[in-house]
Image (tube, grey):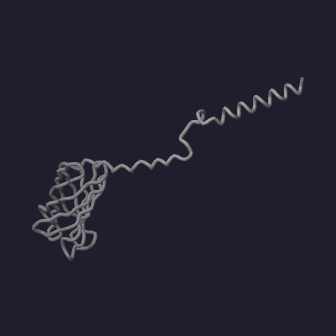
Amino acid sequence: MTTHRFVYVLVAAALTASIGCNRDNITGPPLSATPVPPAPTPTPVPGDIAGSWIGSATTPGGGGCGKFDANATFQQSGQNVTGTLNAIGGPCGFTNQAFQGTLVGSALSGTSSGADGRATVKGTLSGAGLTLKVRGLYIDTPEVDMNLHR
């Protein structure tokens, strides 16, 4: 009787193995399937920079102007931003600089131009705060830093 039992167990194991290896019972993609490419990294949603901003400006690169009043007004359409920058500080300041640039996530970049010249502008939007670095308006004042809030 033990020989018969051994044969039954052996037959049952063989049937189970053949059923388990049946292609219809395997789940998941076939081994020869082409890999799925990773999802693209989404473009950061621009922050909300539209409106009026006030604060102060300094000239860390020299110029001896100390701290002075500053303001900006921006309009926004998606990532595109336009506006006006003002830093009222005697020889280191500027008024009515027309700004044009983009806001990607919290990073603002663009240019400004007006009677005082043309400058590059880079900034960071952080909640209710905005910091801007205006570079290239004056030879003796390489940078004006603006710290603004709503």
Please provide percent x and percent y for residue 122: 27, 62
In the image, 108: left or right of 96?
A: right
Identify whether 94 is placed above or below 41.
Answer: below
Residue positioned 11% across, 65% down in the render: 114
Residue at image coords 72%, 30%: 15
Left or right of 44, for residue 87: left
The N terminus sits in image quarter: top right
Estimate the x, y position of residue 85 in percent, counting from the top left: 16, 59
Identify which residue, 42 or 83, lies in the foreground.
Answer: 42
For image coordinates 25% across by 73% down, the residue present is 62
Q: Nearer the viewer, residue 20 or 52?
A: 20
**Residue most toward the bottom?**
140
Compared to 2, does 54 lie above or below?
Answer: below
Q: Nearer the viewer, residue 94 or 120?
A: 120
Where residue 61 sits in the image (x, y, percent)? 27, 72
Q: Where 127 sits versus 122, above or below?
A: above
View extreme (top): residue: 1
Q: Residue 9: horizontal and vertical position, in percent? A: 80, 28
- Left or right of 22? Residue 112 is left
Placement of 145 over or under 18, stated as above or below: below
Count the labels in the image: 0
Name the residue at the left extreme.
Answer: 115
Identify the residue at horizontal 18%, vertical 56% (top origin).
Answer: 71
